[in-house]
Image (tube, helix red, strand yellow):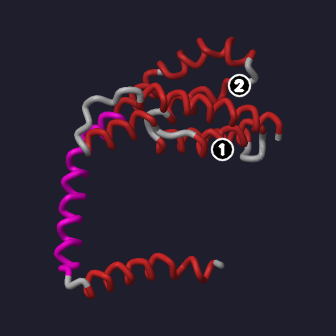
Amino acid sequence: MTTVSNFIIPAVIFLIVGFGFTAKDKCYESFLDGAKEGLKITVDILPTMIGLLFGVGILRASGLLELLCRMALPLTGRLGVPGELLPLFGVKLFSSSAALGLLLDIYKEFGADSTIGRIASLVMSSTETLFYTLSVYFLSVKVSKTRYTLAGALLSILAGTVASVMIGNMM
């Protein structure tokens, strides 16, 4: 199966290029146009990405994130949520790379096979970097009215987090 999977992507690329040649399409020019458009989108979203990473850095460095987590600890402790995971839940909304750093810290301190490590792994795999994703995708296609996207995304992240905590505590 591994051998087959190694050939799937090159086969798809050759099929696309082959189809383009048989249709007498200018494949290389189309590729260059797509690459130019991709670079333009990257330049457009770069300030947003920098702003989000800068904001997460400020939250962590200022201690505000830890203060908010300490304030939420009495409520979350009654719900069976380990307090050590609260910073991960908050940071994951903004930056997956910063959340990955917190995940590695959790693994170093508690171990990957601990209950906290398992819950953290489940949360990382079942939730999305909401604000990063919304800002990047909506900015790239110039959507200004998001309607119910934020509420729906927050609800799905809450469901993923609750399910992760429940499943992690059962393991």
- Which numbered dot is residue 3? none
Q: Is residue 141 above or below residue 22?
A: above
Q: Identify the image quadrant of the N terminus.
A: bottom right
Q: Identify the image quadrant of the C terminus.
A: top right
User: Residue at horizontal 66%, vertical 42%?
Assistant: 122
In which quadrant of the rendered view does residue 141 lie? top left
Q: Is residue 85 above or below residue 123?
A: above
Q: Position of residue 24 (x, y in %)?
A: 20, 85
Q: Position of residue 157 (x, y in %)?
A: 55, 33
Residue named by callout 1: 121
> Circle 1 sits in a helix, a strand or a loop, which is it?
helix
Q: Nearer the viewer, residue 9 or 117?
A: 9
Three-letter amino acid code of the residue under disc 2: Val
Q: What are the residue bounds of the magenta stretch? A: 25-53
Residue named by callout 2: 81
Which comes sooner in the sequence, label 1 or label 2?
2
Q: Nearer the viewer, residue 167 or 18?
A: 18
Q: Are marks 1 and 2 in contact (CB under 8 Å)?
A: no
Q: Is residue 48 magenta?
A: yes
